[in-house]
Image: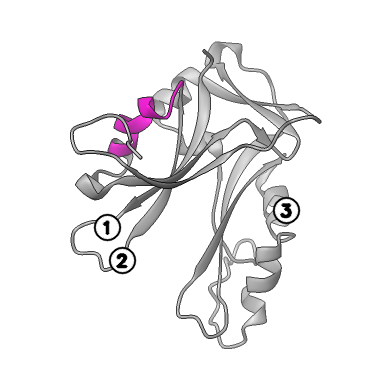
C-alpha cells in the first residue's frame, strides 16, 4: 500500500478555553489511524480533549493527481500544493469566519490570486465592511490569514522521507470529505467514531 497525504481537522476544548478551537493537521501515512501519535505531538496542549472533526485523504486537487513519493524518487515539479486559510467578517456577526482551500499553483502569488476568486472572498472581504479596521495582510493586500506549501506543514520525518508529486489528471475524482466527531481516546492510537 502506498503512503497517502491526509488533511485532518482537529478540535480541542483545552483547559481554560471557553469555546472549542480547531486546527488543521497534514500528515503522510498508510492509514489515518497510523497518524494519531503525530496528531497528539502536533497539539500536545489539547491533551485528552483532542478529537477529529473531519478528514480527507488528499488524492485530487483542481484536476491534479496528488501522489506521495519517496524522497529519493523526487521529480521536479513546477507546481506546488498550497493550503490557504482565508478570514473574513460578516456584518452583524461577532466572529471571524474562515474558509480553507487547497490549490495547485506555481507560486504563492498565484495561490493568493486564486483565493480571491472564491465566493467566500468575494462576499466576506474586508473591503465590503467599512467599519472593520485593517486586518488585511499588508504584504498581499487581501485577507489571507495563512498560506503554506503543504511541504511546510509536514513533520520533519515526513519531509525527510517523502515528496508530494502533482500530475495532471483530467479524470481525477473529487476527494471524499469525512465529517463527524471522532474521539481519540487517551493512551490509544486510533480514533473511534
* 22 lies left or right of 58: left
Quick check: 12 above or below 71? Answer: below
- Label 3's element? helix
Q: Which residue is mark 1?
A: 13
Residue at the spot 27% in from the left edge and 29% down from the top edge? 189
How was this image coloured?
A: one colour
Residue at the spot 67% in from the left edge and 80% down from the top edge? 128
Crowding at dot 1, Cα within 10 Å, few <14 / some 14-19 / many 20+, comes out as some
Q: Earlier in the sequence, mark 3 or mark 1?
A: 1
Query: What percent of the width, then of the height, locates residue 148?
Result: 55, 45
Query: What percent of the width, then of the height, locates residue 68?
Result: 57, 22
Q: CA distance from mark 2 to mark 1?
A: 6 Å
Query: What percent of the width, then of the height, locates residue 118?
Result: 71, 60
* 184 lies left or right of 83: left
- Label 1's element? loop
Q: Which residues are magenta?
A: 30-40
Magenta region includes residue 61: no
Magenta region includes residue 37: yes
Q: Which residue is mark 3?
A: 114
Front in this rendered view, residue 170 or 73: 170
Mark number displayed over residue 47: none
Q: Earlier in the sequence, mark 3 or mark 2?
A: 2
Q: Which residue is mark 2?
A: 19
Q: CA distance from mark 3 to mark 1?
A: 33 Å
Can you name the residue that lies furthest to the front here? Answer: 193
Residue at the spot 39% in from the left edge and 55% down from the top edge? 22
Amino acid at each position: 500500500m502506498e503512503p497517502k497525504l491526509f488533511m485532518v481537522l482537529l478540535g480541542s476544548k483545552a483547559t481554560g478555553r471557553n469555546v472549542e478551537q480547531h486546527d488543521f493537521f497534514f500528515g503522510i501515512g498508510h492509514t489515518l489511524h497510523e497518524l494519531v501519535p503525530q496528531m497528539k505531538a502536533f497539539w500536545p496542549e489539547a491533551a485528552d480533549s483532542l478529537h477529529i472533526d473531519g478528514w480527507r485523504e488528499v488524492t485530487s486537487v483542481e484536476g491534479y493527481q496528488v501522489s506521495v513519493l519517496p524522497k529519493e524518487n523526487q521529480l521536479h515539479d513546477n507546481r506546488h500544493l498550497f493550503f490557504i486559510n482565508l478570514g473574513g467578517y460578516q456584518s452583524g456577526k461577532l466572529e471571524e469566519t474562515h474558509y480553507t482551500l487547497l490549490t495547485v499553483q506555481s507560486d504563492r502569488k498565484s495561490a493568493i490570486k486564486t483565493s480571491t476568486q472564491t465566493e467566500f472572498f468575494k462576499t466576506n472581504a474586508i473591503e465590503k465592511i467599512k467599519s472593520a479596521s485593517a486586518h488585511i495582510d499588508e504584504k498581499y493586500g487581501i485577507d489571507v490569514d495563512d498560506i503554506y506549501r503543504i511541504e511546510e506543514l509536514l513533520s520533519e520525518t515526513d519531509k525527510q522521507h517523502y515528496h508530494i508529486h502533482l500530475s495532471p489528471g483530467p479524470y481525477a475524482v473529487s476527494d471524499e470529505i469525512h465529517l463527524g466527531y471522532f474521539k481519540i481516546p487517551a493512551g490509544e492510537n486510533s480514533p473511534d467514531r
